[in-house]
Amino acid sequence: MPHVSSTPPPTLFCLHFLGGSAQEWDGVARQLGDAVRCVPLDLPGFGDAASVPGTSVAAMADHIAGRITAMAPAHWWIAGHSMGAKVALALARRAEDGDAILAGFGGLVLVAGSPPSPEPMSDDKRREMIAWISADADTRRVKAGEFIDQNTGTPLPETDKARAVADVLRADPAAWIAWLEAGSREDWCRRIGVLRSPALVLSGSEDADLGAAAQTCLTLPHLADARHIILDGAGHLLPLERPEAVADLVRETMAQAGVPSAQAVPVPRDYEDLIASPRVNGRLREALETRAQPDDPAYRPEVLNAVELALLRAVIDRVLPQPGEASIDIGARIEARLASGQGDGWRFAALPADPEAYAAALRTLDVSASAAHSVGFLALAGPVQDALLAAVAEGELPTVDGDLDGPQMKLWFEDLRGDVVRTYLAHPAALARLGFSGIGAGGDDSAHMTGFTELGIDAREPWEPIAQGTDAR
């Protein structure tokens, strides 16, 4: 007799897009079968919950939290599509912060998601969508059909399209307008911070507003352990367009997900031995051991927001590439220093204090990238990023509505490069790569400082480390 597991499958709560309903997930649920218990839910103002009040992100999250609590699954994930993704992110933050009613949370699936920051949408498109939802019945039916067609890479089968159009038409117009005027514009960037839980992020290659670039620039910075998949040829309505692909990726991700572990940058054994030797004084040894500790992969910034921290890391990767799989999280270490208020005691008079200067410069760089290339800095290829940074270094970055001007950006970039090098060289792995032996000048016994005895050109002490090489590539 075959063995039958008594462990129930994990539960996946699914939230829909603006104008959709729980039934948009029917195809995905069928494809998931018994591997995952799929529970689609209607958000307030939509589907069977059209009469339920509460249209802010927090109110919608409260409504869904109540549904989750009523079911009390032992282990569950949450999937959010478009509008639903912002609600899912809010619930994930509550769960990670220890909300008891959300115990058992395991991870996220974000499908063409509305990001924590205000959703990228032109004012013209927003006005158009608000105008037709309250029009006469015939106009609404035509516009609802156009809305579905505009959000798919290829036309849906007629039956699927008819169901999607019917969902749009039964939505409460007030809830539709509330999302466009307020909910989509809510800024949860700092409240969401960086989530530790595993996440699957799905994008359609033909999604104009919330496609791969938007997810890269606005959503992925909030996820410490994310897998981003782009479905070629698909638009915005992925659960309707590609239910099989979505289900396969969800099943695979939920089965393989684990907790991201901190990975220390390895320090060569001979350098570790030098640090532990009597040649290094105790205070320096303690400092080096602290600096060698692994960085938290889900580090939550305090001065910068999650997007600004991601921008800082991206800039640093271009300024000082690091070899190997493990690297020093220089960006997080600089951010922690900014948050602590510690510094070198001076700044350029043309710049604000360091925390404000960093945030303003990173915003300016991102705005300039968007103006020049129609996507944010994080979505640009490396050579294009390099060209922008070269312009920054020369004081020639064309700033558009940025917080800093070109000359100020040049000064900040000078400061940044100094901070990057200092932070990098503070790590014992970097000192080992350079073969730096100055840490062994003397231990704690000042009466017997060993120092150096071999002072000739190219002369080495027997205990001195050999350089491990450089980071050039």
Image (cartoon, helix red, strand yellow):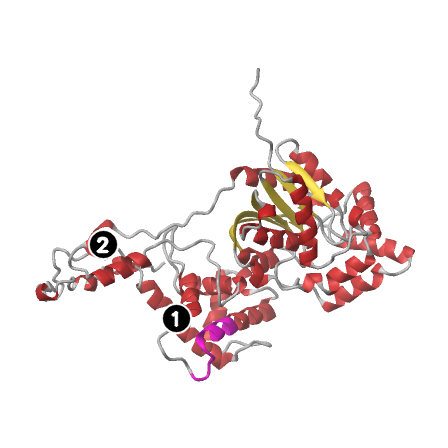
Residue 92, percent from left and from top: 58, 51
Report the magenta stretch's main SS.
helix
The x, y position of residue 364, in whole percent, is 54, 73
- Regarding residue 52, the answer to whether it shows in the image is yes
Give yes or no for residue 358 being in the magenta stretch. yes
Residue 130 lies in the magenta-colored region:
no
| Quadrant containing the N terminus in the rendered view | top right
Q: Is residue 333 left or right of residue 275?
A: right
In this view, the residue farthest toward the top is 1
- At 22% from the left and 56% from the top, the residue drawn is 275
Q: Judge whether 258 appears above or below 333 on screen.
A: above
Mark toward the start of the polypeptide (2 vs 1): 2
How many marks on residues?
2
Identify the element where label 1 is drawn.
helix
User: Label 2, on which residue?
Assistant: 271
Name the residue type under label 2: Tyr
Please tell me which residue lies in front, 86 or 372: 86
Query: What is the number of the mark on residue 365?
Result: none
Residue at position x 55%, y 68% from top?
A: 366
Looking at the rendering, the stretch of residues picked out in magenta corresponds to 349-361
| Circle on res. 417 | 1
Q: Position of residue 217 (x, y in %)?
A: 57, 60
Q: Determine contact: label 2, label 1, CB under 8 Å.
A: no
Q: CA distance from mark 2 to mark 1?
A: 26 Å
